[in-house]
Image (cartoon, helix red, strand yellow):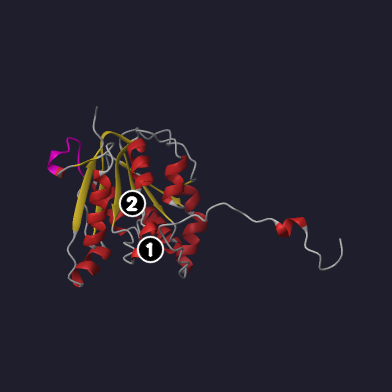
Amino acid sequence: MHMGEPSNHSLKVSHQPRKVRSFVRRTGRLTRGQKQSLDYLFPKFGLAMDAPLPDNWQPGQVVVEIGFGMGDALHQLASAYPQFNFIGIDVHRPGIGHLLNRIESSGIKNLRLIEGDAMEWLNQTQWHQSLHAVLLWFPDPWPKKRHHKRRIVQTEFLQHLSEVLKPGGYWHFASDWIPYADAVKERIGRQHQLQLIPPEQIQTEVLRRPTTKFEQRGMALGHQITDLYCLKPTC
């Protein structure tokens, strides 16, 4: 091959569609403590994306929070509800490091973390009908119309929820962006696996949502908070 002549490899064009993600991976600056937590505590309190349900965890008593931020609300939940086991899934490494340190210092035993894209986890997990609840609190609303495709709540997401929730389990969505909440209601109405329902009508135990940093920020801006609950029917 002559110098300057394009190789066969360079002529290949990928026709795979570009994956649309619901998040922007912001690296952020890790503190020394957060980095140490990731290095030394993730092997202790972390789970791989394809990990099976831990042996000592009872199916149906597992709660997953998608996008836990710095993890303060998730830590409060795990402390308040020791009868459940909790999983937090996020890509924000400073938040993961911060929460790992809190898990270690508090000594709680019922909280584990997964670093990665929640949609990828939902695509590959074998935890079918194992979850008591899935929590999605104040996800990025992607307010510009051209970015709506980035919103995590799409048809595929709802389908995956119906597969991992146990019969009688529920999904709790919270947002301070009314147009996003309205779009979620509309999308729920177009499928039949999950039912929008008042929380008082859910027969299993409903976890009380702590006030989050994003909720406080939204309220300071005068935004209305919307909480939606979707039940997976028992039959």
Of callouts 2 and 1, which one flags the residue occurring earlier in the amino acid sequence?
Answer: 1
Q: Nearer the viewer, residue 207 or 159?
A: 159
Q: Amino acid at mark 1?
A: His
**Is residue 108 at all visible to an observer of this figure?**
no
Name the magenta segment's main secondary structure: loop
Q: How many C-alpha atoms fall within 10 Å of the one at disc 2: few (<14), some, or many (≥20)?
A: many
Point out residue 153 in the picture as x, y percentages from the top left corner: 33, 51
Query: Which is more foreground, mark 2 or mark 1?
Result: 1
The extreme left residue here reads 200
Q: Name which residue lies at 35% across and 56% down.
A: 68
Q: Nearer the viewer, residue 143 or 110?
A: 143
Residue 147 is marked as: 1
> Please, is residue 120 above or below residue 35 in the view?
above
Quadrant of the snapshot with the N terminus: bottom right
Between the residue at mark 2 and the residue at mark 1, the CA separation in whole angstroms equals 13 Å
> Is residue 13 shown left or right of residue 67?
right
Q: Which residue is mark 2?
A: 153
Q: Quadrant of residue 211?
A: bottom left
Q: Quadrant of residue 82?
A: top left
Quadrant of the snapshot with the C terminus: top left
- Is residue 175 rendered magenta in the image? no
Q: How many C-alpha atoms fall within 10 Å of the one at disc 1: few (<14), some, or many (≥20)?
A: few
Q: Name which residue lies at 52% across and 57% down.
A: 39
Q: Nearer the viewer, residue 150 or 137?
A: 150
Q: Which residues are magenta?
A: 200-206
**Is residue 226 at all visible to an observer of this figure?**
yes
Q: Amino acid at mark 2?
A: Val
> Is residue 138 shown left or right of residue 36?
left
